[in-house]
Structures are given as C-alpha cells and as structure tokens.
Image: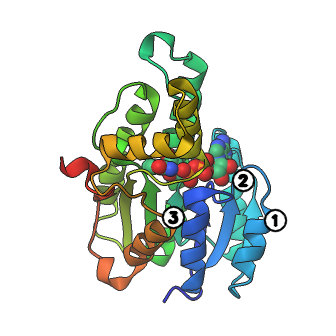
Amino acid sequence: MLHGKIALVTGSTSGIGHGIALELAKQGANIILNGFGEFEPAKAEVAALGVKVGYHGADMSKPAEIEAMITYANAEFGGVDILVNNAGIQHVAPIESFPPEKWDAIIAINLSAAFHAMRFAIPGMRAKNWGRVISIASAHGLVGSAQKVAYVAAKHGIVGMTKVVALETATTGITVNAICPGWVLTPLVQKQIDDRAVKEGIPVEQASRELLSEKEPSLQFTTPEQLGGLAVFLCSPAADNIRGVAWAADGGWTAQ
Ligand code: NAD
C-alpha cells in the first residue's frame, strides 16, 4: 500500500519507533531510521523486508541536526512523505526536585523536535500534495500523572501542535495526527518498572503488574506492532480525512 513512499521515523533504533518502522516497511515504504545507540540491527531488519533503508543520527534536541536530516532525506530519498515524530525521553521526579536540565531536554526532544521536523518536512509534502505526520504523544498528552511534569507538558503540547498543523494543512493531501499510547513495554518503561521494583523491594513482575493495574484497565501493554498497525491505517486512503486527532491506544486508560 505504501510502495514508493518515504517514511522518516525519529527514535527508531528502539521500542515504538522501531516497531512502527517495521510495519511501514511491510507495506512497502522506504525507511529513514534515526536514534541513538546501535542502528545496524534495526537497519538490517528493515532492509530484509526489501525496501530502501537509510539512517541519520541527528540529535533531535538540536534544530540544525534535524534540518540536516531532512536535507539528507531530500537528497538521498527524494523527500519525506511520512514523518513519524517518535523520539522521546522520560524523567520522573516531583516538581520541587525536578532537574531544570531534564525539563529542558524533555521539552527539546519530546516537543520542540516535532515542531522543527514538521517545519522542515512539510514544504516537501505540500509540493507533492500528499503527506502524513504522525506524532507519538501519549495517554499523558490527554491526562496527567504525578512526577512527570515535563513529559506531560510536552505531550499535551504535541496534541495541541497536532491540531494547529492539521488545521493549517486541512485543504491539502497532508494529514497531521497524534497517537496516544498507554503503557508499552520498551526500555523507556522497563526503567520505570525496574526503579519501582527496587524502591518497593518487590519482584520486577509484581512491579510490572502494579504499574498496569494503576492506570490501564486492560491490564495489558500496548505493543509497538499494534502502534505500527495504527500508523499504517493513518497512512491509508481510509484516513485521508482524519485530521488533528489524538488517538488513544491505551487499554482504556483515558476512558476512565
Ligand atoms: P525507547 O527509549 O525505547 O526509544 C526512544 C528512541 O528515541 C530511541 O531510539 C532513542 O535512541 C531515541 N532518542 C532519544 N533521545 C534522542 C535524541 N535526542 N535524538 C534522537 N533520538 C533520540 O522509548 P519508547 O518507549 O519506544 O518511546 C518512543 C516514544 O513513544 C516516545 O516519544 C515516548 O514518549 C512515547 N511513548 C512511550 C510509551 C511507553 O509506554 N513506552 C507510552 C506513550 C508514549
């Protein structure tokens, strides 16, 4: 369905971004990966699906590097048709002891990066009159949780920014939407589970169950594959007129 389309997925060396890149590639999209750490395994996995795959190591907290990544996409792939704003980090602490540098980093990577990526990528989408922007917000883009001031602020910001850019592109073939996952078992969440197990002196499995039962009525993690499937749907013609939504995939978290 997506043969010939070019998808840039930020933060796709791990977790949700990796899962979304694979599902888009299964539909035939060429993929540009981004993110820290080892990227060769992810690149090989995508390449095995028979699509063209590239990698750019832009630090998403640095606007000049984001611009360089879009320039690379234009030069090497012919543009960005599908932009998945996914790179993100977390820090958990009450506001009084929340390190200001963590606030700055979370706002830069989880919020401002999507602004910069969109402003650099959308002109190319306008030229083709087709595009998809899918930003990975969170249930925390819709509701709050204690100790996550920067993350919740950034994710609410993503939801707001999604609405604005969807309105600005409403008469074009470009759609702009957000996906709001609940708990997904990735390194970002595993750290929170491990910290909880240590703090409460309980086994990791129990910490995992407690984490789910606090927020997620389904008591199940959402998977990167499921989120990839939702991204594929948002790229399909059936979603041509879905604009500015913040689509929960959270096991009922925000239905409460
Ligand atoms: P993860 O830690 O597994 O992956 C994060 C990715 O972002 C990695 O590839 C990492 O290298 C990359 N990254 C981090 N900082 C970067 C930077 N400065 N520049 C470029 N890349 C950078 O995390 P994940 O759980 O897969 O999270 C992906 C997104 O999904 C995040 O935006 C997160 O907020 C969101 N999310 C996660 C969950 C969850 O339960 N895991 C729930 C809702 C939303």
Query: Which of 97/232 is in front?
Result: 97
Label located before the other in sequence (1 or 2)? 1
Residue 150 percent coordinates (x, y)? 45, 29
According to the picture, the residue beneath numbered tag 1 turns out to be 40
**9 vs 214: above or below:** below
**212 vs 19: above or below:** above
Colouring convention used in this rendered image of the protein:
rainbow
According to the picture, the residue beneath numbered tag 2 turns out to be 68
Residue 199 percent coordinates (x, y)? 54, 24
SS at circle 1: helix
Q: Nearer the viewer, mark 2 or mark 3?
A: 3
Q: Is residue 46 left or right of residue 21?
A: right
According to the picture, the residue beneath numbered tag 3 turns out to be 224
Residue name at image x 55 percent, y 39 percent: 203
| Mark 1 vs 3: CB contact within 8 A | no
Residue 65 percent coordinates (x, y)? 71, 46
Estimate how packed mark 3 is, as few (under 14), some (14 to 19) or many (20 or more) residues with alpha carbons within 10 Å: many
Query: Which of 114/14 is in front?
Result: 14
